[in-house]
Image: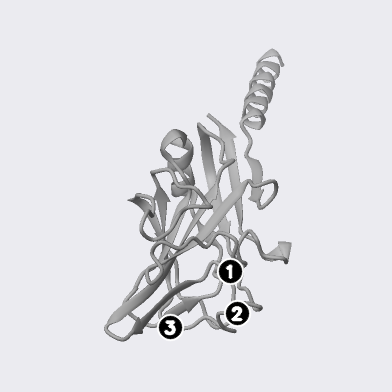
Amino acid sequence: MRITNVVALGLFTLLLASCSKSSKKLVLEAKNGSIEDALICKFLPHQNFYEEENIHLYSSKQGDSINVNRVVINFKEIPANIKVDSAFLQLKFNAKSAIGKESYGENGFIIKRIISPWDETEVNWANAPITTDNNQVFTNKTELNEDPKRINVTRLVQDFSDDKDNSYGFLLKLIDENSSSLVLLASSNNSDASLRPKLKIYYSDK
């Protein structure tokens, strides 16, 4: 009986330790300036687009040149030094975009971690921040008026948390910037709050 009690006590202690490190959930969304995002445009390299309701990824041949739009986005409140169990980026299709009514083309895109500072009100194509290819994420093609599938960015967010002092958000760019493609996405400035970007993080303390 005494041995049984000791075993039970040991199991209870393990359970308490497990619960103390249980996964927590954090949802980062556009409140009080906690998210910054902006569009950068190759054809307008010195123009800033931070107040747009859209953050559309775009490429199109125009004459002998290719026009390209990319997006920078920063979730500034990602905690430092956590163990990221999983993290998912939620981006929504914007049906009211003035750019078009549906996404098209081979519009899968890449998400890279930004490793140099940028200012939402000043960033443009010419002064675009530096990125790293480490743990970059590739997404599938987005059809017509659908939202991009839930995007697993666990490793990117872990890198961000581990190196918070040198992490400044993410850059989104089309995988193929040489074809006619478009992804219509809502920005953190969108009038419909349900369409704004969100980052869901499930984590535990290290």
Q: Which residue is mark 2?
A: 98
The quadrant where residue 90 appears: bottom right
Query: Do the residues bearing badges 1 and 2 touch, measured as CB atoms within 8 Å?
Result: yes
Amino acid type indicated by mark 3: Gly
Q: Which sits earlier in the primary sequence, circle 3 or circle 1?
A: 1
Q: Considering the image in quadrants, where does the N terminus appear?
A: top right
> Which is nearer the eye, 50 or 88?
50
Pinpoint residue 66: horizontal percent, then vertical percent: 32, 78
Q: Is residue 148 left or right of residue 166?
A: right
Q: Position of residue 196 (x, y in %)?
A: 65, 61
Residue at the location (52% across, 61% down)? 151
Asked whether the beta carbons under mark 3 and mark 1 sit within 8 Å of each other, the answer is no
As measured in the structure, the alpha-carbon distance from the residue carrying label 1 to the one carrying label 2 is: 9 Å
Sooner in the amino-acid sequence: mark 3 or mark 2: 2
Task: Describe the element under mark 2 as helix, strand or loop.
Answer: loop
Side (left or right) of 148 relative to 128: right
- Viewer-nearest residue: 1 or 11: 11
Q: Which numbered dot is residue 54?
A: 1
Q: Residue 150 is drawn in which quadrant?
A: bottom right
What crowding class fits label 1: few (fewer than 14 Cα within 10 Å), some (14-19), or many (20 or more)? many
Front disc: 3 or 1: 1
Q: CA distance from mark 3 to mark 1?
A: 18 Å
The kind of residue tagged 1 is: Asn
Q: Which mark is residue 105?
A: 3
Furthest toward the bottom, the residue is 63
